[in-house]
Structure formats: structure tokens, C-alpha cells
Image (cartoon, rainbow, N blue to C red):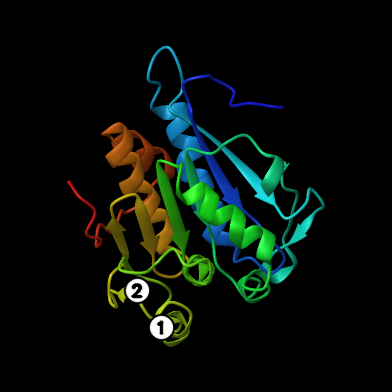
Amino acid sequence: MPIAQQSNSRNVAILVFDEVEVLDFAGPFEVFSVAGSELPAAPYAPFFPYLIGLNTQPVQARGGFVVQPRYRFDDAPAPDVLLIPGGNGTRRLLKHPALLQWLREQAARVEVLASVCTGALVLGASGLLDGRRVCTHHQAYERLRELAPGALPQEGRRFVQDGALWTSGGISAGIDMSLALVQALVGDTAPVRAEMEWMWVDQGDAAA
């Protein structure tokens, strides 16, 4: 079984699927990829990001963008950070029992479980949001309440941390959440933001 490039790196698994929103997964992937090269925590790089899919066949994201997952979700290196992006394709994931069960299993062991945009709906369908503060795309709160009536929606937040659970609003908010995650896990984002030339909008409520 392939493992992280460095034994002490945090494995960052990002799910992709047909009709996934491109920036939902590509933005966080870029943050963790840049952090892995710009924040060397000798003797190992701090993050090893990789894409996982329902299988390893190419995925057609929004707008016809095609990307190939590196691993199948149930046969991938064990993640330390697991991120579920959003997009129209999440609607089909809500009816994928094997994936939902796998998410429940991973939630019990990962260091961080995160979602971007309507990825929160998938976590809601998995039963992982009861009693948890959560945010999602501004147009998806009604659906979130239907799927997870026990969740505590935080409308108007760019991202929210509730313990090991991190959720963000739509699309570009996933980059801000990922930067906050890097700061929480490693303690520095300045080199990452400089390399990306990103104006970080820190409008979440992640613990300092």
C-alpha cells in the first residue's frame, strides 16, 4: 500500500467526484501543496496532499475540468486530514452508502474532518453534524437543515471550527479555511500566502 512521501507528514486526502466544484478541491490542494514545500518542518515536509475518488477513473469536474484521483477512497493511505468538497455531484454522494459509512469510520480516527461548500451536505447525510457548529454555501442552508436537523448552522461565516470538524462556505472560502488549518496545525501561513499571493480573509472562528 502506498504511504505518505514522508513518514511524519500529515496525509491530506481530498475527495473528488463527477461535478465537483473545481476550486473547492483545487484551492485547498494548492494550500497544502504549497505548505508542504514552503514550510519544511525538518526532517520532513508537514503535508502530503492527494486526491481520492469513488474509483481511480478520471473525474469530470464542473465545466468539463478532468482530473484523475490518485487512490480509491476505501483503498487509500489513511488520512490525517480528510476534506470533502462541494458541487452538484454531492447530490449523488448522499445516496452512496459505502462512502457515507467510510466517512463515519474516518471521522472517528482522523485529526481533522473538513468540508468546503456543499460538502457539508455529505457530512450531514453521514450523521456527523449533530450538535456541531457548521457552515456551507449560502444557498444550501435549507438543504443542510433537512439532512442534519441536529446541526447548528452558522450563516454568514466564511469558515467554522468545531473541535476536529472544520467547514467552510462556498468555493473560495475553502482556501481561507485551509490556510487557517495550516496555521492551527503548523503555526505559520505567511510563506504560503506570499507564494500564493493570496489576500487571506480570516472571517472564520477557528480557535487561535
Quick one: 173 or 85, which is closer to the camera?
A: 85
Residue at the left extreme, as displayed: 208
Mark 1 touches mark 2? (CB < 8 Å):
yes
**Depicted 10 relative to depicted 136: above or below:** above
Q: Where is residue 42 drawn, in percent x and y? A: 39, 14
Q: Residue 46: x percent and y percent? A: 43, 27
* Residue drawn at x 32%, y 54% as measured from the top left: 199
> Which residue lies under the disc numbered 2?
151
Q: Measured along the vertical axis of the image, is residue 75 above or below residue 144?
A: above
Q: Which residue is mark 1?
A: 145
Q: Is residue 55 left or right of residue 118?
A: right
Q: Residue at x 43, y 44 (%)?
A: 196
Is 39 rendered above or below residue 150? above
Q: Earlier along the polypeptide chain: callout 1 or callout 2? A: 1
Give me the residue at 43% from left, 59% from top: 174
For the residue labelled by badge 2, is the local secondary structure a helix, a strand or a loop?
loop
Kindly report the distance in space between the C-alpha atoms of the residues bearing marks 1 and 2.
7 Å
**At which x and y percent is residue 127?**
47, 67
Q: Is residue 148 left or right of residue 155?
A: right
78 is higher (above) or lower (below) than 161: above
> Image quadrant of residue 167?
bottom left
Let me know if residue 189 appears in the view.
Answer: no
User: Of the residues shown, which amino acid type is indicated by label 1?
Assistant: Arg
Camera-nearest residue between 190 and 52: 52
Q: Residues within 10 Å of mark 1 (few under 14, many from 20)?
A: some
Q: Secondary structure at mark 1?
A: helix
